Image (cartoon, rainbow, N blue to C red):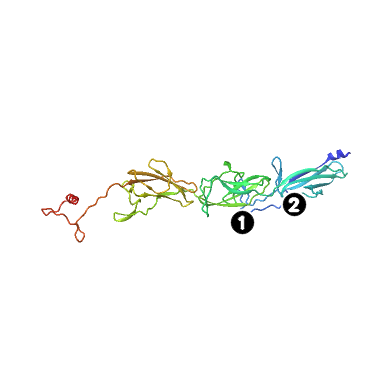
Amino acid sequence: MSKIIRKILFSVAISIFIFTHGELVSQYRQYGIETADGTIANPSSTRIVNKGLDPFYKRKAENYFNGSIRYVSSDSFFKLNSSDFGTGVQKVEYSVDDMPFQEYMNPFNILSEGNHIVHYRSIDNGGNIEKANLFQVFVDNSAPLISIGSDRELYTDGIRVYCSNRTKFFVAAVDNPSGAGVRMTYGGFSPDELVEKGNGVSANQNFFSIQKEGDVELYYSAMDNVGNMAKVKKFLVTVDSKPPLVRIKKSDNLKERNGKLVTIPSSDVRSSAGEYIVSSNTEVAFEGVDEGAGVQMLYIKVNDEEYVRYEKPIQLRNADKYVILVKAEDKVGNISSPVQFNFSLDFENPASRIDVIDSTGKSVPIMSKTNSPISTKENKESNKE
């Protein structure tokens, strides 16, 4: 049989596979949880959430092709197969990255990251040498870089990071530009229960919000297309969904009224209709109170005017009565419902009188010419005179 025919009758093939027993069991990686203080112990639970991530996930061999490049991790091994219909296969040889050919004995993997070229061939017992085949593969052992993104800027006071329950989050993941690419991101409120959160980009289908109130621990990770998983990270955020309260700011304008000291304006000085009574020279100030992220600004609407940003105390001078609406916004965008304050200006002049009393403080009645007490009405007229 000619060499040409013999070369057609034997061939060698390469395959990528996972070893599950024997000496070639892959050394899977075990990932922990990375926090600001470093890596903490792996979660003890073995629960797997539906469409989620096994808390004891270990990388395994994968074989990914994106249409132009084949990707694997170092947990993938290469197995060479050869057949010959003539004298039989004597040996199979391979070379990685232009290294000298060596005889193939067992499946092999490639530890170094990057692009690699494998040449392989077989030789039969008649001395026929197959033309070397070429297999190109990219080894990717690097997990994606991950962070938490949001649709709006978060507020921090230097100690806590605040958001509202309307803030939309996503797990941002970026793989090495030459790597296999991001397959999936994961997130959840427990390191044992991470569920799928999309492909790592800012898009509506990847957004999620946090409806819990108060301090929340958000755990997140991401995996690329050959199974490299980022260490689970923890993001601490305080969810503040309560708007600020609005009130009249306590004034230092202290006055005596009906025998006691009061501040003006205050609930102690109100009309029978419930209006706050102030004078035209009284400044009226408002404030917001917030137990969460803190007050950002106030808005005020006076009578039929439009809302404007409240900057400083106001004076009410041009009308007898005022209806003022005030609302407050906190630093994560929660806005209170408008609070209405009714004011009445005091334009009425005060009235005074004089009474005659004895040394004990008792009132001394006015006597008429007939030596009889004057009536109350006559007494008032006497005071006017």
Residue 78 locus on image (x, y percent): 75, 47
- Report the residue that reaches farthest toward the left: 370
SS state under label 1: strand
Q: How would you rate the neighbour count of disc 2 (Cα within 10 Å): few for under 14, some for 14-19, many for 20 or more? A: few
Give whichever of 40, 315 is nearer the camera. Answer: 315
Q: Which residue is mark 1?
A: 38
Q: Residue at x 71, y 45 (%)?
A: 71
- Report the residue that reaches farthest toward the bottom: 359
Residue 322 locus on image (x, y percent): 35, 44
Q: Quadrant of the N terminus?
A: top right
Q: Which residue is mark 2?
A: 24
Is 165 on the left-hand or right-hand side of 144? left
Q: Amino acid at mark 1?
A: Gly
Residue 98 locus on image (x, y percent): 79, 47
Asked whether residue 191 appears in the rendered view, the answer is no
SS state under label 2: helix
Circle nearer the N terminus (2, 1): 2
Is 307 on the left-hand or right-hand side of 59? left
Give whichever of 265, 81 is nearer the camera. Answer: 265
Is 367 on the left-hand or right-hand side of 275? left
Q: Count the marks.
A: 2
Q: Residue at x 83, y 44 (%)?
A: 122
Tell me the CA gap for discs 2 and 1. 32 Å
Give whichever of 240, 307 is nearer the camera. Answer: 307
Which of the 4 quarters of the picture holds residue 304?
top left
Residue 243 locus on image (x, y percent): 46, 48
Which of the 4 quarters of the picture holds residue 39?
bottom right
Q: Amino acid at mark 2?
A: Leu
